[in-house]
Amino acid sequence: MRMRKKRHLDERMERCGEVCLGWIPDYIAEQRDRPIPEPFNIKKVFGNENPVHLEIGCGKGRFIQQMAERNPDINFIALEQTPNVLVTAMERTLNSGIKNLRYYAGKAEYLEKIFPRRSVEMIYLNFSCPYPKESYAKHRLTHPIFLKIYRNILTEQGSIRQKTDNRRLFEFSIENFSQNGFALGNVSLDLHNSEISGNIMTEYEERFTEMGMPIFYLEAYPQNFCK
């Protein structure tokens, strides 16, 4: 069922212009009065050339905001396709005064329209929709279609960090990373009972943990870059 549009959503989105970099083209197709964003330029956006970390599907922004607060020497970008949710994340960031975090509205299929080749140091995939029906497998964010996009925008030393509560999606991800030129590290079937440190919980993660559900985690590293 389609989410009902929040009251005054357009006005709230406009007020968040300071932290919103724009609408990636597929969303513009529905909102034709929105300007097409320019390709991402680190120096122009942040005034520095610090490394760029990207979260795909940031939800209400709890994870990415805490990451930005703890890591002021990293530039963070968050992508979210649902404006109703995205506006909450952007308003939180505006109210916090955080300067090293910005947002895009749109879908991951179009990341290459915005991010130059080899421009992102790390990608976070936190509790992405598992699309359990096999007929929807191409929509899973670790399908080979998306892995090709990630390889193109990641730096040669870049990596992907994935967290999920869904074992089938996790197994699907391991298989696809392994078959598409990625090395795996820090694979855990129970993140919170592992030796992996520095974890920041998302809203979903906190809920699943309170329910006693294990959190699956992995890190993936692209291999064999072509020069």
Image (spheres, rainbow, N blue to C red):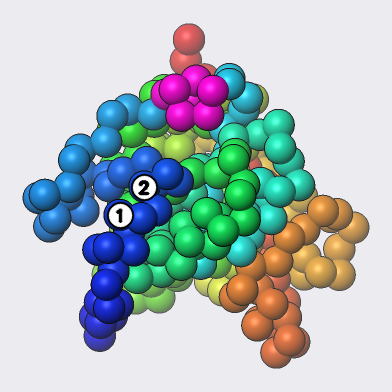
> For the stretch drawn in magenta, what is the main secondary structure?
helix
From this view, report whether residue 101 is shown above or below residue 227.
Answer: below
Classify 10 Å Cα crowding around label 2: few (below 14), some (14-19), many (20 and above): some
What residue is pinned by disc 2? 17
From this view, report whether residue 104 is shown above or below residue 121.
Answer: below
Residue 165, disc:
none
Q: Nearer the viewer, residue 68 or 151?
A: 68
Q: Residue placed farthest to the bottom in the image?
A: 211
Magenta-colored stretch includes residue 42: yes
| C-alpha gap between disc 2 and disc 1 | 5 Å
Q: Nearer the viewer, residue 67 or 128?
A: 67
Q: Nearer the viewer, residue 198 or 136?
A: 198
Residue 120 place in picture, x, y as percent: 53, 31
Residue 224 place in picture, x, y as percent: 55, 22
Residue 14, disc:
1
Magenta-colored stretch includes residue 3: no
Classify 10 Å Cα crowding around label 1: few (below 14), some (14-19), many (20 and above): few
| Rendered residue at 76%/47% (across/down) | 70
Q: The disc labelled 1 sits on which kind of residue?
A: Glu
Q: Which residues are magenta?
A: 41-47
Q: At numbered mark 2, what does the secondary structure look like: helix, strand or loop?
A: loop
Relative to 51, 136 lies left or right: left
Whether residue 158 can be seen here: no
From this view, report whether residue 96 is shown above or below residue 203.
Answer: above
| Rendered residue at 39%/29% (across/down) | 40
Q: At numbered mark 1, what does the secondary structure look like: helix, strand or loop?
A: helix
Q: Are marks 2 and 1 in contact (CB under 8 Å)?
A: yes
